Image (tube, grey):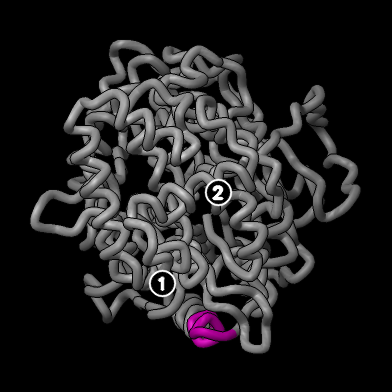
Amino acid sequence: MFVESPIWALLLCLAGGVGRTLAEPLAMRQAQQQRIWTEYLLTGDNTGKQEMPADIAYERGGFQQRRSINTPYWFDQVIDHFGSNQTFKQRMFINDDEYVPGGPVYLFNSGETPASPAYLSGGEPHTLAKATGGMLIIMEHRYYGKSYPVSNMSGPNMKYLTIDNALEDIAYFIRNAAGFVKDTIGVDISPASKWVATGGSYSATLAVWARKRYPDLIHAAYASSAPVLIEPDFYQYDQVVARALPCASDIASAVSVLDNILDSRNRTLIDKWKKAFALQDLKDDADFAGALTDQMSTTVQYYMPPAKGSDAPDSIAQLCGWFKNTRNIPLQNMADMTAAHIRNNRIDPVSAYSSDSGATNYALYQDGRAWFYQTCTQFGFWQSAPRPPLRRLRSKYVTSKWQSKPCQAFFGKDVSGIPDTQYLNDEFGGLTPDVSRVVFVNGLHDPWSELSVARNLPDSTRNVMITMPLASHVVDFYAANSRTDFGVDIARKNILEAINMFLAQN
Protein backbone atom coordinates (compact mmCIF):
# COMPACT_ATOMS: atom_id res chain seq x y z
CA MET A 1 0.00 0.00 0.00
CA PHE A 2 1.36 6.04 -1.78
CA VAL A 3 2.85 8.18 -4.32
CA GLU A 4 2.82 11.67 -5.75
CA SER A 5 3.76 13.99 -8.62
CA PRO A 6 2.61 16.80 -10.99
CA ILE A 7 -0.16 15.69 -9.23
CA TRP A 8 2.18 17.42 -6.77
CA ALA A 9 -0.13 20.30 -6.07
CA LEU A 10 -2.70 17.76 -5.03
CA LEU A 11 -0.06 15.85 -3.13
CA LEU A 12 0.73 18.83 -1.00
CA CYS A 13 -2.96 19.15 -0.38
CA LEU A 14 -2.97 15.56 0.77
CA ALA A 15 0.15 15.56 2.91
CA GLY A 16 -1.21 15.27 6.39
CA GLY A 17 -4.61 16.39 5.16
CA VAL A 18 -6.29 13.15 4.18
CA GLY A 19 -9.53 13.11 6.10
CA ARG A 20 -9.25 9.61 7.46
CA THR A 21 -5.70 10.05 8.74
CA LEU A 22 -6.55 13.07 10.83
CA ALA A 23 -8.24 10.79 13.35
CA GLU A 24 -5.16 8.60 13.68
CA PRO A 25 -2.23 8.99 16.08
CA LEU A 26 1.05 10.20 14.70
CA ALA A 27 2.67 6.84 15.33
CA MET A 28 0.04 5.26 13.11
CA ARG A 29 0.48 7.95 10.47
CA GLN A 30 4.23 7.39 10.33
CA ALA A 31 3.87 3.63 10.11
CA GLN A 32 1.49 3.97 7.20
CA GLN A 33 2.75 6.93 5.17
CA GLN A 34 2.96 4.68 2.19
CA ARG A 35 -0.67 3.59 2.66
CA ILE A 36 -1.93 7.16 2.62
CA TRP A 37 -0.26 8.14 -0.63
CA THR A 38 -0.80 4.85 -2.40
CA GLU A 39 -4.49 5.10 -1.71
CA TYR A 40 -4.56 8.50 -3.35
CA LEU A 41 -2.76 7.25 -6.41
CA LEU A 42 -4.85 4.13 -6.62
CA THR A 43 -8.20 5.82 -6.26
CA GLY A 44 -7.65 9.46 -7.10
CA ASP A 45 -9.70 10.23 -3.99
CA ASN A 46 -8.21 12.96 -1.84
CA THR A 47 -11.03 13.03 0.67
CA GLY A 48 -9.97 9.87 2.46
CA LYS A 49 -13.61 9.16 3.18
CA GLN A 50 -15.21 5.75 2.85
CA GLU A 51 -18.75 5.26 1.65
CA MET A 52 -20.64 2.99 3.98
CA PRO A 53 -21.96 0.08 1.93
CA ALA A 54 -25.65 -0.57 1.67
CA ASP A 55 -26.88 -4.12 2.10
CA ILE A 56 -24.72 -6.33 -0.06
CA ALA A 57 -26.96 -8.24 -2.43
CA TYR A 58 -25.25 -11.36 -3.68
CA GLU A 59 -27.34 -13.40 -6.08
CA ARG A 60 -26.69 -17.10 -5.74
CA GLY A 61 -27.51 -19.17 -8.77
CA GLY A 62 -27.15 -17.38 -12.09
CA PHE A 63 -24.69 -14.51 -12.54
CA GLN A 64 -25.28 -11.01 -11.34
CA GLN A 65 -26.55 -8.44 -13.79
CA ARG A 66 -23.42 -6.77 -15.12
CA ARG A 67 -24.01 -3.05 -15.15
CA SER A 68 -20.56 -1.81 -16.10
CA ILE A 69 -16.89 -2.53 -15.74
CA ASN A 70 -17.08 -0.85 -12.32
CA THR A 71 -19.60 -3.34 -10.96
CA PRO A 72 -18.38 -4.97 -7.73
CA TYR A 73 -18.84 -8.68 -7.18
CA TRP A 74 -18.82 -10.44 -3.84
CA PHE A 75 -16.88 -13.64 -3.19
CA ASP A 76 -17.62 -15.93 -0.26
CA GLN A 77 -14.23 -15.87 1.47
CA VAL A 78 -13.35 -17.95 4.52
CA ILE A 79 -13.05 -15.89 7.71
CA ASP A 80 -10.33 -18.06 9.27
CA HIS A 81 -8.55 -20.46 6.95
CA PHE A 82 -6.98 -22.16 9.95
CA GLY A 83 -10.14 -22.48 12.03
CA SER A 84 -13.80 -21.84 11.29
CA ASN A 85 -15.38 -22.44 7.87
CA GLN A 86 -17.62 -19.39 8.20
CA THR A 87 -17.42 -16.89 5.35
CA PHE A 88 -17.63 -13.17 4.69
CA LYS A 89 -18.19 -11.12 1.54
CA GLN A 90 -14.97 -10.05 -0.15
CA ARG A 91 -15.25 -7.40 -2.86
CA MET A 92 -13.93 -8.11 -6.35
CA PHE A 93 -13.75 -6.21 -9.63
CA ILE A 94 -13.26 -7.94 -12.97
CA ASN A 95 -12.25 -6.78 -16.45
CA ASP A 96 -12.39 -9.47 -19.13
CA ASP A 97 -12.54 -7.07 -22.10
CA GLU A 98 -9.10 -8.10 -23.36
CA TYR A 99 -9.29 -11.74 -22.33
CA VAL A 100 -8.75 -14.44 -24.93
CA PRO A 101 -9.07 -18.13 -24.00
CA GLY A 102 -5.76 -19.31 -22.60
CA GLY A 103 -4.58 -15.76 -21.85
CA PRO A 104 -3.17 -14.95 -18.39
CA VAL A 105 -5.23 -13.88 -15.40
CA TYR A 106 -3.73 -10.96 -13.48
CA LEU A 107 -4.75 -10.87 -9.82
CA PHE A 108 -4.22 -7.62 -7.93
CA ASN A 109 -4.85 -7.80 -4.20
CA SER A 110 -5.26 -4.13 -3.30
CA GLY A 111 -3.36 -4.41 -0.02
CA GLU A 112 -3.79 -1.64 2.54
CA THR A 113 -6.13 0.41 0.35
CA PRO A 114 -9.73 -0.09 -0.77
CA ALA A 115 -10.07 -1.95 -4.07
CA SER A 116 -10.54 0.60 -6.85
CA PRO A 117 -12.13 -0.04 -10.23
CA ALA A 118 -9.82 2.67 -11.58
CA TYR A 119 -7.30 -0.12 -12.05
CA LEU A 120 -9.61 -1.94 -14.43
CA SER A 121 -8.88 0.67 -17.10
CA GLY A 122 -5.59 2.25 -16.03
CA GLY A 123 -2.30 1.35 -14.42
CA GLU A 124 0.32 -1.23 -15.27
CA PRO A 125 -1.76 -4.37 -14.49
CA HIS A 126 -4.36 -3.19 -17.04
CA THR A 127 -1.60 -2.42 -19.55
CA LEU A 128 -0.23 -5.94 -19.14
CA ALA A 129 -3.65 -7.54 -19.50
CA LYS A 130 -4.32 -5.52 -22.65
CA ALA A 131 -0.94 -6.45 -24.16
CA THR A 132 -1.18 -10.16 -23.39
CA GLY A 133 -4.87 -10.98 -23.90
CA GLY A 134 -5.38 -11.26 -20.17
CA MET A 135 -8.15 -10.92 -17.63
CA LEU A 136 -7.69 -8.54 -14.69
CA ILE A 137 -9.21 -9.26 -11.30
CA ILE A 138 -8.93 -6.88 -8.36
CA MET A 139 -9.35 -8.46 -4.93
CA GLU A 140 -9.96 -6.30 -1.88
CA HIS A 141 -7.82 -7.19 1.13
CA ARG A 142 -9.69 -8.39 4.21
CA TYR A 143 -10.42 -5.60 6.73
CA TYR A 144 -10.09 -2.88 4.06
CA GLY A 145 -12.58 -1.00 1.91
CA LYS A 146 -15.85 -2.88 2.32
CA SER A 147 -14.50 -6.40 2.92
CA TYR A 148 -14.96 -7.05 6.61
CA PRO A 149 -15.23 -10.45 8.33
CA VAL A 150 -16.25 -8.77 11.61
CA SER A 151 -18.84 -6.30 12.86
CA ASN A 152 -16.38 -3.82 14.43
CA MET A 153 -12.64 -3.16 14.74
CA SER A 154 -12.11 -3.78 18.44
CA GLY A 155 -8.92 -5.54 19.46
CA PRO A 156 -10.33 -9.08 19.70
CA ASN A 157 -12.04 -8.74 16.32
CA MET A 158 -8.76 -8.00 14.56
CA LYS A 159 -7.38 -11.51 15.11
CA TYR A 160 -8.22 -12.70 11.60
CA LEU A 161 -6.05 -9.98 10.05
CA THR A 162 -2.86 -11.97 9.50
CA ILE A 163 -0.48 -12.47 6.61
CA ASP A 164 -1.26 -16.18 6.56
CA ASN A 165 -4.98 -15.52 6.21
CA ALA A 166 -4.39 -12.84 3.57
CA LEU A 167 -2.22 -15.17 1.50
CA GLU A 168 -4.67 -18.02 1.86
CA ASP A 169 -7.42 -15.65 0.65
CA ILE A 170 -5.49 -15.42 -2.62
CA ALA A 171 -5.03 -19.17 -2.93
CA TYR A 172 -8.62 -20.00 -1.96
CA PHE A 173 -9.95 -17.54 -4.50
CA ILE A 174 -7.78 -18.89 -7.32
CA ARG A 175 -8.93 -22.44 -6.54
CA ASN A 176 -12.54 -21.30 -6.83
CA ALA A 177 -12.19 -18.55 -9.42
CA ALA A 178 -13.47 -20.49 -12.44
CA GLY A 179 -16.87 -21.06 -10.89
CA PHE A 180 -17.06 -17.57 -9.40
CA VAL A 181 -16.21 -15.77 -12.65
CA LYS A 182 -18.63 -17.97 -14.60
CA ASP A 183 -21.42 -17.28 -12.10
CA THR A 184 -20.81 -13.54 -11.92
CA ILE A 185 -19.99 -12.42 -15.46
CA GLY A 186 -20.67 -15.57 -17.47
CA VAL A 187 -17.10 -16.01 -18.71
CA ASP A 188 -15.10 -19.23 -18.69
CA ILE A 189 -11.50 -19.07 -17.47
CA SER A 190 -9.53 -21.47 -19.61
CA PRO A 191 -7.65 -24.21 -17.73
CA ALA A 192 -4.65 -23.14 -19.83
CA SER A 193 -4.66 -19.62 -18.36
CA LYS A 194 -1.70 -18.81 -16.14
CA TRP A 195 -2.13 -16.68 -13.03
CA VAL A 196 0.11 -13.65 -12.43
CA ALA A 197 0.00 -11.97 -9.01
CA THR A 198 0.56 -8.20 -9.12
CA GLY A 199 0.78 -5.39 -6.61
CA GLY A 200 2.36 -2.16 -5.48
CA SER A 201 3.94 -1.57 -2.06
CA TYR A 202 2.48 -3.95 0.58
CA SER A 203 0.30 -5.60 -2.07
CA ALA A 204 3.50 -6.24 -4.06
CA THR A 205 4.93 -8.00 -1.02
CA LEU A 206 1.83 -10.18 -1.00
CA ALA A 207 2.36 -10.95 -4.70
CA VAL A 208 5.95 -12.12 -4.06
CA TRP A 209 5.02 -14.18 -1.03
CA ALA A 210 1.99 -15.72 -2.75
CA ARG A 211 4.21 -16.77 -5.66
CA LYS A 212 6.61 -18.38 -3.19
CA ARG A 213 3.97 -20.14 -1.10
CA TYR A 214 1.70 -21.27 -3.95
CA PRO A 215 3.92 -21.93 -7.00
CA ASP A 216 1.40 -24.50 -8.22
CA LEU A 217 -1.31 -21.82 -8.43
CA ILE A 218 0.62 -18.66 -9.34
CA HIS A 219 2.83 -18.81 -12.41
CA ALA A 220 4.57 -15.44 -12.04
CA ALA A 221 4.46 -12.14 -10.15
CA TYR A 222 5.00 -8.44 -10.83
CA ALA A 223 6.00 -6.56 -7.66
CA SER A 224 6.35 -2.78 -7.65
CA SER A 225 8.16 -1.32 -4.61
CA ALA A 226 7.70 -4.44 -2.51
CA PRO A 227 9.16 -4.22 1.05
CA VAL A 228 10.05 -7.89 1.44
CA LEU A 229 12.44 -7.35 4.37
CA ILE A 230 10.31 -6.83 7.46
CA GLU A 231 12.11 -4.28 9.60
CA PRO A 232 10.64 -3.29 12.97
CA ASP A 233 13.09 -0.40 13.47
CA PHE A 234 13.20 1.17 10.03
CA TYR A 235 15.93 3.77 10.62
CA GLN A 236 17.22 3.30 7.05
CA TYR A 237 14.27 5.28 5.74
CA ASP A 238 15.89 8.59 6.64
CA GLN A 239 19.13 7.67 4.91
CA VAL A 240 17.38 7.70 1.53
CA VAL A 241 15.53 10.91 2.39
CA ALA A 242 18.83 12.57 3.35
CA ARG A 243 20.49 11.58 0.08
CA ALA A 244 17.62 13.07 -1.89
CA LEU A 245 17.34 16.46 -0.14
CA PRO A 246 19.97 19.15 -0.89
CA CYS A 247 18.94 20.84 2.35
CA ALA A 248 19.44 17.72 4.48
CA SER A 249 22.24 19.33 6.49
CA ASP A 250 19.99 22.28 7.39
CA ILE A 251 17.22 19.91 8.47
CA ALA A 252 19.66 17.87 10.55
CA SER A 253 20.90 21.06 12.21
CA ALA A 254 17.35 22.13 13.03
CA VAL A 255 16.54 18.72 14.51
CA SER A 256 19.68 18.75 16.63
CA VAL A 257 18.78 22.14 18.12
CA LEU A 258 15.21 21.00 18.72
CA ASP A 259 16.42 17.93 20.61
CA ASN A 260 18.62 20.13 22.80
CA ILE A 261 15.58 22.25 23.58
CA LEU A 262 13.52 19.18 24.48
CA ASP A 263 16.39 17.83 26.56
CA SER A 264 16.47 21.07 28.56
CA ARG A 265 12.96 20.45 29.99
CA ASN A 266 12.60 24.24 29.90
CA ARG A 267 8.83 24.49 29.66
CA THR A 268 8.80 28.10 28.57
CA LEU A 269 11.30 27.51 25.77
CA ILE A 270 9.61 24.31 24.58
CA ASP A 271 6.19 25.95 24.50
CA LYS A 272 7.62 28.89 22.59
CA TRP A 273 8.83 26.60 19.82
CA LYS A 274 5.64 24.57 19.80
CA LYS A 275 3.79 27.78 19.07
CA ALA A 276 6.25 28.68 16.33
CA PHE A 277 5.48 25.35 14.65
CA ALA A 278 1.70 25.89 15.15
CA LEU A 279 1.73 22.79 17.35
CA GLN A 280 1.08 24.44 20.70
CA ASP A 281 -2.00 22.29 21.33
CA LEU A 282 0.06 19.10 21.50
CA LYS A 283 0.65 18.23 25.16
CA ASP A 284 3.09 15.38 24.63
CA ASP A 285 6.55 16.63 23.65
CA ALA A 286 7.27 13.41 21.74
CA ASP A 287 4.11 13.94 19.68
CA PHE A 288 5.41 17.43 18.91
CA ALA A 289 8.79 16.06 17.81
CA GLY A 290 7.18 13.39 15.70
CA ALA A 291 4.83 15.79 13.93
CA LEU A 292 7.72 17.34 11.99
CA THR A 293 8.51 14.33 9.79
CA ASP A 294 5.66 13.89 7.34
CA GLN A 295 6.45 16.73 4.95
CA MET A 296 10.03 15.72 4.28
CA SER A 297 9.28 12.00 4.11
CA THR A 298 6.39 12.25 1.70
CA THR A 299 8.15 14.78 -0.50
CA VAL A 300 10.92 12.27 -1.18
CA GLN A 301 8.86 9.09 -1.13
CA TYR A 302 6.50 10.39 -3.76
CA TYR A 303 8.85 12.58 -5.72
CA MET A 304 8.65 12.88 -9.47
CA PRO A 305 10.59 15.54 -11.37
CA PRO A 306 8.45 18.12 -13.14
CA ALA A 307 7.52 17.16 -16.68
CA LYS A 308 9.43 18.94 -19.40
CA GLY A 309 7.67 22.14 -20.37
CA SER A 310 5.57 22.06 -17.22
CA ASP A 311 5.11 25.03 -14.91
CA ALA A 312 4.76 22.69 -11.93
CA PRO A 313 7.34 23.33 -9.21
CA ASP A 314 9.95 20.78 -8.28
CA SER A 315 8.68 19.49 -4.94
CA ILE A 316 12.14 18.90 -3.46
CA ALA A 317 13.37 22.34 -4.52
CA GLN A 318 10.17 23.82 -3.12
CA LEU A 319 10.67 22.18 0.27
CA CYS A 320 14.35 23.12 0.47
CA GLY A 321 13.51 26.67 -0.52
CA TRP A 322 12.27 27.23 3.03
CA PHE A 323 15.84 26.84 4.29
CA LYS A 324 17.34 29.52 2.05
CA ASN A 325 16.37 32.29 4.43
CA THR A 326 19.79 32.92 5.96
CA ARG A 327 18.40 35.54 8.33
CA ASN A 328 16.87 32.71 10.35
CA ILE A 329 18.45 29.74 12.04
CA PRO A 330 17.43 26.43 10.38
CA LEU A 331 15.04 25.61 13.24
CA GLN A 332 13.08 28.81 12.58
CA ASN A 333 12.92 27.98 8.87
CA MET A 334 11.60 24.52 9.71
CA ALA A 335 9.03 26.06 12.02
CA ASP A 336 7.87 28.46 9.30
CA MET A 337 7.58 25.59 6.82
CA THR A 338 5.62 23.38 9.21
CA ALA A 339 3.27 26.15 10.32
CA ALA A 340 2.50 26.99 6.69
CA HIS A 341 1.88 23.31 5.94
CA ILE A 342 -0.57 23.03 8.83
CA ARG A 343 -2.29 26.28 7.93
CA ASN A 344 -2.55 25.63 4.19
CA ASN A 345 -3.89 22.10 4.67
CA ARG A 346 -6.20 23.04 7.53
CA ILE A 347 -4.78 20.35 9.78
CA ASP A 348 -6.08 19.92 13.31
CA PRO A 349 -2.82 19.10 15.12
CA VAL A 350 -4.48 17.31 18.04
CA SER A 351 -6.50 14.89 15.95
CA ALA A 352 -3.67 14.52 13.43
CA TYR A 353 -0.66 14.08 15.69
CA SER A 354 -1.74 12.94 19.16
CA SER A 355 -0.61 9.36 19.74
CA ASP A 356 -3.83 8.14 21.34
CA SER A 357 -6.29 9.86 19.01
CA GLY A 358 -9.00 7.46 17.84
CA ALA A 359 -7.94 4.54 20.06
CA THR A 360 -11.46 3.64 21.18
CA ASN A 361 -13.18 4.19 17.85
CA TYR A 362 -14.05 0.63 16.85
CA ALA A 363 -16.25 1.44 13.85
CA LEU A 364 -15.66 -0.28 10.53
CA TYR A 365 -14.27 1.44 7.44
CA GLN A 366 -11.03 2.63 9.03
CA ASP A 367 -8.30 1.46 6.68
CA GLY A 368 -5.71 3.25 8.79
CA ARG A 369 -6.72 1.30 11.86
CA ALA A 370 -6.35 -1.99 9.98
CA TRP A 371 -2.87 -1.04 8.76
CA PHE A 372 -1.86 0.09 12.22
CA TYR A 373 -2.88 -3.33 13.57
CA GLN A 374 -0.71 -5.04 10.97
CA THR A 375 2.27 -2.86 11.88
CA CYS A 376 1.68 -3.52 15.59
CA THR A 377 1.41 -7.29 15.20
CA GLN A 378 3.50 -8.36 12.20
CA PHE A 379 5.45 -5.61 10.43
CA GLY A 380 6.72 -2.83 12.63
CA PHE A 381 8.06 -0.63 9.82
CA TRP A 382 8.46 2.07 12.49
CA GLN A 383 10.33 4.91 10.76
CA SER A 384 12.70 5.89 13.53
CA ALA A 385 15.58 8.30 14.06
CA PRO A 386 18.93 6.82 12.99
CA ARG A 387 21.57 6.33 15.67
CA PRO A 388 24.77 8.39 15.72
CA PRO A 389 26.93 8.85 13.77
CA LEU A 390 24.27 8.56 11.07
CA ARG A 391 22.63 11.84 10.12
CA ARG A 392 19.17 12.36 11.59
CA LEU A 393 16.35 14.22 9.87
CA ARG A 394 13.92 13.44 12.67
CA SER A 395 14.10 13.90 16.40
CA LYS A 396 15.79 11.29 18.56
CA TYR A 397 12.49 11.14 20.43
CA VAL A 398 10.93 9.49 17.38
CA THR A 399 11.84 5.92 18.33
CA SER A 400 10.26 2.61 17.40
CA LYS A 401 9.27 2.23 21.06
CA TRP A 402 7.42 5.55 21.05
CA GLN A 403 5.65 4.75 17.78
CA SER A 404 4.51 1.33 19.00
CA LYS A 405 3.30 2.67 22.35
CA PRO A 406 -0.32 3.26 21.20
CA CYS A 407 -0.75 -0.37 20.06
CA GLN A 408 -2.10 -1.52 23.43
CA ALA A 409 -4.42 1.48 23.70
CA PHE A 410 -5.88 0.65 20.31
CA PHE A 411 -6.01 -3.14 20.43
CA GLY A 412 -5.59 -4.32 24.01
CA LYS A 413 -2.86 -5.39 26.37
CA ASP A 414 -2.00 -8.49 24.34
CA VAL A 415 -0.83 -6.33 21.41
CA SER A 416 2.55 -5.10 22.58
CA GLY A 417 3.68 -3.39 19.39
CA ILE A 418 6.73 -5.67 19.27
CA PRO A 419 5.90 -7.82 16.23
CA ASP A 420 7.46 -11.18 15.49
CA THR A 421 9.14 -10.04 12.30
CA GLN A 422 11.62 -12.89 12.40
CA TYR A 423 8.88 -15.34 11.47
CA LEU A 424 8.09 -13.53 8.22
CA ASN A 425 11.75 -12.99 7.32
CA ASP A 426 12.54 -16.65 7.95
CA GLU A 427 9.44 -17.87 6.16
CA PHE A 428 9.85 -15.77 3.02
CA GLY A 429 13.58 -15.01 2.92
CA GLY A 430 13.73 -11.25 3.40
CA LEU A 431 15.92 -9.65 0.72
CA THR A 432 16.83 -13.05 -0.72
CA PRO A 433 13.49 -14.77 -1.31
CA ASP A 434 13.70 -18.22 -2.88
CA VAL A 435 11.32 -17.47 -5.74
CA SER A 436 11.28 -17.58 -9.51
CA ARG A 437 9.47 -15.68 -12.28
CA VAL A 438 9.14 -12.45 -10.29
CA VAL A 439 9.67 -8.95 -11.70
CA PHE A 440 10.97 -6.69 -8.91
CA VAL A 441 10.60 -2.99 -9.78
CA ASN A 442 11.86 -0.09 -7.66
CA GLY A 443 12.66 3.59 -7.83
CA LEU A 444 15.89 4.41 -6.01
CA HIS A 445 14.38 7.69 -4.75
CA ASP A 446 11.99 5.56 -2.72
CA PRO A 447 12.97 5.08 0.95
CA TRP A 448 11.15 1.74 0.90
CA SER A 449 13.60 0.45 -1.69
CA GLU A 450 15.92 -0.19 1.27
CA LEU A 451 13.61 -3.09 2.17
CA SER A 452 13.08 -4.31 -1.39
CA VAL A 453 14.98 -6.30 -3.98
CA ALA A 454 16.46 -3.22 -5.60
CA ARG A 455 20.20 -3.75 -5.65
CA ASN A 456 21.02 -7.44 -5.47
CA LEU A 457 18.86 -9.96 -7.34
CA PRO A 458 18.71 -13.33 -5.57
CA ASP A 459 18.67 -15.36 -8.81
CA SER A 460 19.01 -13.46 -12.07
CA THR A 461 18.42 -16.61 -14.08
CA ARG A 462 14.90 -16.95 -12.66
CA ASN A 463 13.86 -13.37 -11.79
CA VAL A 464 14.11 -9.86 -13.22
CA MET A 465 15.08 -6.69 -11.33
CA ILE A 466 14.26 -3.26 -12.77
CA THR A 467 15.38 -0.03 -11.08
CA MET A 468 14.61 3.59 -11.94
CA PRO A 469 17.24 5.96 -10.48
CA LEU A 470 15.03 9.08 -10.58
CA ALA A 471 11.73 7.48 -9.63
CA SER A 472 10.15 6.81 -6.30
CA HIS A 473 7.37 4.70 -4.80
CA VAL A 474 5.17 2.60 -7.16
CA VAL A 475 5.39 5.09 -10.04
CA ASP A 476 5.43 2.32 -12.65
CA PHE A 477 2.25 0.76 -11.26
CA TYR A 478 -0.44 3.22 -10.37
CA ALA A 479 -3.36 4.30 -12.48
CA ALA A 480 -2.94 8.06 -12.11
CA ASN A 481 0.55 8.20 -13.63
CA SER A 482 0.59 8.88 -17.36
CA ARG A 483 4.20 10.08 -17.33
CA THR A 484 6.58 8.36 -19.72
CA ASP A 485 9.80 10.21 -18.87
CA PHE A 486 12.54 9.81 -16.19
CA GLY A 487 12.82 6.07 -16.95
CA VAL A 488 9.20 5.03 -16.42
CA ASP A 489 8.62 4.21 -20.10
CA ILE A 490 11.75 2.04 -20.21
CA ALA A 491 10.74 0.28 -17.01
CA ARG A 492 7.27 -0.50 -18.34
CA LYS A 493 8.72 -1.84 -21.58
CA ASN A 494 11.02 -4.11 -19.58
CA ILE A 495 8.17 -5.23 -17.32
CA LEU A 496 6.15 -6.38 -20.34
CA GLU A 497 9.17 -8.17 -21.81
CA ALA A 498 9.76 -10.01 -18.53
CA ILE A 499 6.08 -11.01 -18.18
CA ASN A 500 6.02 -12.29 -21.77
CA MET A 501 9.18 -14.28 -21.07
CA PHE A 502 7.64 -15.80 -17.95
CA LEU A 503 4.37 -16.62 -19.70
CA ALA A 504 6.29 -18.52 -22.39
CA GLN A 505 7.78 -20.77 -19.70
CA ASN A 506 6.10 -23.90 -18.39
* Secondary structure type for disc 2: helix
Q: 234 or 186, which lies in front?
A: 234
Label 1 residue SS: strand
Q: Which numbered disc covers residue 443? A: 1
Q: Which label is found at residue 4?
A: none
Q: Is residue 356 left or right of residue 146?
A: left
In the rendered image, residue 486 lying in the magenta stretch gets the answer yes
> Residue 171: where, in percent of width, then height?
48, 45
Residue 448, picture quadrant:
bottom left
Q: Nearer the viewer, residue 50 or 387?
A: 387
Tag 2: Cα neighbours inside 10 Å, few (<14), some, or many (≥20)?
A: many
Q: What's under tag 1, amino acid-wise?
A: Gly
Q: Nearer the viewer, mark 1 or mark 2?
A: 2
Q: CA distance from mark 1 to mark 2?
A: 26 Å
- Residue at 61% x, 46% y is 139
Numbered range of the magenta stretch: 485-492
